[in-house]
Image (tube, rainbow, N blue to C red):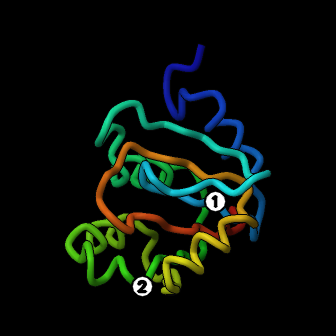
Amino acid sequence: MLKQGILHPQLATVLANLRHMDTLVLGDAGLPVPKGVERVDLGWRPGDPKYLDVLEELMKWIVVEKATFATQSKTVSPDFHAQALKLLPDGIPVDYIDHTELKARSKDAKAIILTGEFTPYTNVILQCGCAY
């Protein structure tokens, strides 16, 4: 039994299998998951787990070189979005695209991690970097 790190076996496997340039989507409870993309559903009740808590923990375990958010995150949930930005690695590029485009691009992700978050437009595409 693991005594630290990511204890969720499916999530741990997804993270261990990520490679440079792979994308991982972290989403709220309502983000649709395209057919063929692995779904890691962590939500078990409204608000749990929190998106920001999951994002913070992911940043401890994976290398991220770029993030893409929905443009709407800056206007619909600006305070929440500002908190998310603070959790990302310093200096990485951050792009913004329409939420419809973000959902379309998620079809190319290695996996989509769903949280219990009910705050609108709290979805991000994380592009993995290389650890060396």
Q: Amino acid at mark 2?
A: Thr
Query: Looking at the picture, does residue 54 appear above or below residue 10?
Result: below
User: Is residue 87 among what the camera can see?
Assistant: yes
Q: x, y (%) of residue 98?
A: 50, 84
Q: Nearer the viewer, residue 14 or 40?
A: 40
- Residue 71: mark in rendering: 2
Q: How would you rate the neighbour count of disc 2 (Cα within 10 Å): few for under 14, some for 14-19, many for 20 or more? A: some
Q: Nearer the viewer, residue 31 or 124?
A: 31
Q: Which residue shows up at 52% across the image and 86% down it?
A: 97
Query: Looking at the picture, does residue 15 appear above or below residue 88?
Result: above
Left or right: residue 45 versus residue 18 is: left
Do labels 2 and 1 touch, CB within 8 Å? no
Instruction: Give whichever of discs 2 and 1 has the lower sequence position.
Output: 1
Query: Looking at the picture, does residue 7 appear above or below residue 76?
Result: above
Q: Amino acid at mark 1?
A: Leu
Q: Which residue shows up at 60% across the image and 41% down it?
A: 40
User: Is residue 132 among what the camera can see?
Assistant: no
Q: Which residue shows up at 64% across the image and 44% down it?
A: 39
Q: Mark 1 = which residue?
A: 24
Q: x, y (%) of residue 70?
A: 46, 78
Q: Which residue shows up at 43% across the image and 76% down it?
A: 90
Q: Nearer the viewer, residue 17 or 26?
A: 26
Quadrant occupied by the N terminus: top right
Q: Nearer the viewer, residue 39 or 5?
A: 39
